[in-house]
Every structure is written in C-alpha cells, then in structure tokens.
Amino acid sequence: MWRFGQSLAFVATAHAAANCAKMAGCRNLIGGDQTRPILAGAQSFTEVDGSCRFGHVAKNHDCKPGLSCGYTLFDCTCISERAAEENSTGARNSRFLFGGTSALVAVAILLCAWLWRRGRYKQPSKVAPNIGLPMTLGHSQGPFTGICIEPATVAEGHGTKQAAANCDCLTILLLVFLPGSLLIAGAAIFASGVGIHVGEYYNGCRV
C-alpha cells in the first residue's frame, strides 16, 4: 500500500510538472515587465524611461522555456528597429512554412488513402482457394473497406465460424489519426504566424 501511494504521488507530480506554466524571460530585468523590460547594463535603442523601444532578445541564445516550471531566465539585450523587423518576418515566415507543410502532408496522405481505396474497389473479385472447407468472402461498403479485409464465414459442421477481420491498426492510425493531427497542428502553427505583426514590438522570449 505504501509503494502504491508512492507511485500515485510520483504520477501526480509528473502530471503537474507536465501541465505547469513554462515561460522564458530576462534575468537582467530591473524595471518594467517581461513584455517590455528595462534591462540592466548599457543598452541602446531604448525609450525615455529606459525600456526597450523596438524589441529585445536573449544574448547568444534562443529565449525559449525550459523543461522546469516557471521562468527560464536569460541575459537579454535591446535590439534595433531593423533587427526587430527581421526577427518578426523570420518568425512569421517560418510558422507559415511549417504550418502549410503540415497541412499539405496531411492532404497528401488522405489523397493517397482515397486513391488506394478506390483502386481496391476496381479490382476483380478473387476466388478463395479450396482448402477442404467452403469459404465465402463478404463484401461491404464500409468506410475502411480499402484498409481492412472483410471477415470470412467458414462452415464447420452444422455451425459457422466468423473469422476475425484482418484490420491493420497501424494503417488506420497512419491514414486517419496522423492526417488529422497534422491538420490541427498545421492550423495552430499557421494561426500563430498570423498573430505576428512586422513593425510592432518584438519580444524574442514570447515568439
């Protein structure tokens, strides 16, 4: 019972760690906030109050959250207007590229699955081999007819035995769930790119 309690506590801790907020920010923040910081040290491209004017990024690192909960901190610096525009453009274009590519891959998988299924319908029926027992192949117009083999009914004495359908779960996963996941992920990434506006303040720790 004690070990079971320990296991539950470990699972709960891991679940909480996986779902806690993870953010990136500036270690050298001395004023303002993480969205528009006033940074320690000699800084260029600042407003009158000392906050960064066009944007800020981490020095020599990508300002991205780590695996632990809370803030992952970096030494940040203010950047010029040109650098802010270039970073915004690059971040937006990369999201458009990855989002669009994910959606195109999903559509290609669905198209290949549809063509494969259509080709199987056009194939002539094959006569089942005679192995001493009469066998009747079923025909169906179900949604996975092109993926799964319909079960056969085999006569045994006075009864019948329904053979299990030879349905490849991995194939269904690849042709149904994978395209759906790619479409959702691609749409989310593309939408995040739409939210990046060139010419506005660039926060390198939130992009």
Image (cartoon, grey):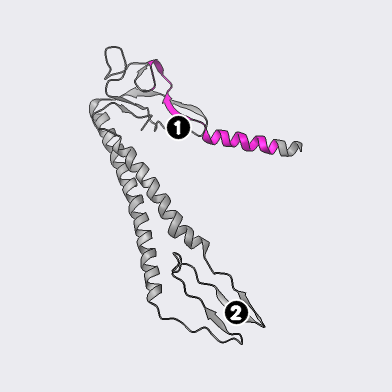
Let me know if residue 25 is in the magenta part: yes
Identify the secondary structure beneath mark 2.
strand
Q: Which residue is mark 1?
A: 65
Helix or strand or loop: what does disc 1 sit on?
loop
Q: Quadrant of residue 10?
A: top right
* Residue ID at (37%, 55%): 106
Image quarter of residue 4: top right
Q: Which residues are magenta?
A: 6-34
Q: Position of residue 143 (x, y in %)?
A: 44, 64
Q: Residue at coordinates 42% horizontally, 50% vertically from top-left? A: 181
Relative vertical location of residue 145 with respect to residue 57 in this rendering, above or below? below
Query: In this orientation, which residue lies closer to the viewer: 52 or 96?
Result: 96
Which residue is the extreme one toward the front? 158
- Residue 32: x, y in percent? 37, 16
Q: How many marks?
A: 2
C-alpha span from label 2 to label 1: 60 Å
Q: What amino acid does circle 2 point to?
A: Val
Residue 4 vs 199, above or below: the answer is: below
Indicate whether 125 appears above or below 80: below
Q: Is residue 203 magenta?
A: no
Camera-side residue of 71 and 106: 106
Cβ atoms under marks 2 and 1 closer than 8 Å: no
Quadrant, the C terminus = top left
> Residue 154: which disc?
2
Q: Earlier in the sequence, mark 2 or mark 1?
A: 1
Q: Residues within 10 Å of mark 1 (few under 14, many from 20)?
A: some
Picture residue at 41% right of the left edge, 52% below the top: 180
The type of residue carrying mark 1 is Pro
The residue under the point 44% across, 81% down is: 125
Q: Nearer the viewer, residue 5 or 70?
A: 5
Mark sitting on residue 158: none
| Mark in the foreground, 2 or 1 | 2
